Image (cartoon, rainbow, N blue to C red):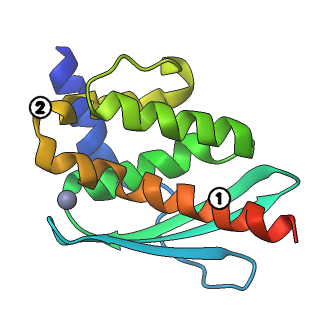
């Protein structure tokens, strides 16, 4: 199996069998909605942070395979991470989708499958939509903590 086939397999697996999909719609969760008009992707994220650790991420969205699979991978990679680690990995993900070598390849796990997106600039927003949503959620949650 070559690398591109492996990447496609990760994307299709997560599209067909998404992890952490479905919203629980409880007050426990911080909710973020973002969309990507250029492709029609629409993403909802629920986030629960406790003691500086991301305990749960749920997602539910409509959109292309890149967007929906990326939300599944994002939720899997970032659940259990500290806020600090999550922010570092989000930045590294933004960097890898535009063609840079990831700094934290091991921690990014399946997310490195999106390296191929650099060849399709129109799809970069699809890959990063759920990551932007979680980034916004983290920033809103940590703001609330400081009050
Ligand atoms: Zn898309």
- Where disc 2 sits, the SS reads helix
The quadrant of the rendered image in which ligand 1 is seen is: bottom left
Residue drawn 53% across the image and 52% down it: 75
Structural crowding at the residue carrying mark 1, measured as other residues with C-alpha within 10 Å and reported as few (<14), some (14–19) or many (≥20): many
- Percent across and percent down for residue 12 are 23, 45
The reply to whether the residue tagged 2 has its Cβ within 8 angstroms of ligand 1 is no
Report whether 10 appears left or right of 76. left
From mark 1 to mark 2, how far is it between C-alphas?
29 Å
Q: Residue at x 30, y 48 (%)?
A: 127
Residue 40 position, x and y percent, is 18, 72
Residue at figure coordinates x 55%, y 65% from the top left:
58
- Where residue 11 is drawn, which disc sits there? none
> Residue 10 in the image: x percent, y percent?
30, 36
The C terminus: image quadrant: bottom right
Residue 40 appears left or right of 93? left
The quadrant in which residue 100 appears is top left
In front: 45, or 10?
A: 45
Count of numbered marks: 2
**Where does label 1 land, which residue?**
138
Q: Is residue 120 shown left or right of residue 30?
A: left
* Residue 96 higher or lower than 133, as above or below: above
Q: Quadrant of the N terminus?
A: top left
Of the numbered discs 1 and 2, the one sitting upstream in the chain is 2
Residue 81, picture quadrant: top right
Q: Which residue is mark 2?
A: 119
Image position of 54 with respect to 113: above or below: below
Q: Tell me where residue 25 appears, x and y as whole percent.
A: 60, 85
Residue nearest the observer in this picture, 83 or 106: 83
């Amino acid at each position: 199996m070559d690398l591109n086939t492996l990447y496609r397999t990760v994307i299709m697996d997560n599209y067909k069998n998404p992890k952490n999909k479905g919203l629980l719609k409880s007050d426990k969760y911080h909710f973020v909605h973002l969309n990507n008009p250029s492709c029609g992707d629409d993403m909802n994220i629920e986030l629960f942070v406790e003691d500086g650790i991301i305990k749960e991420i749920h997602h539910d969205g409509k959109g292309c395979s890149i967007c929906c699979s990326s939300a599944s991978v994002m939720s899997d990679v970032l659940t259990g991470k500290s806020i600090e680690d999550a922010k570092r990995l989000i930045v590294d993900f933004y960097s890898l989708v535009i063609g840079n070598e990831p700094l934290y390849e091991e921690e990014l796990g399946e997310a490195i499958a999106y390296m191929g997106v650099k060849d399709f600039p129109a799809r970069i927003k699809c890959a990063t939509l759920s990551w932007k949503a979680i980034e916004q959620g983290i920033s809103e949650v940590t703001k609330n903590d400081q009050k």
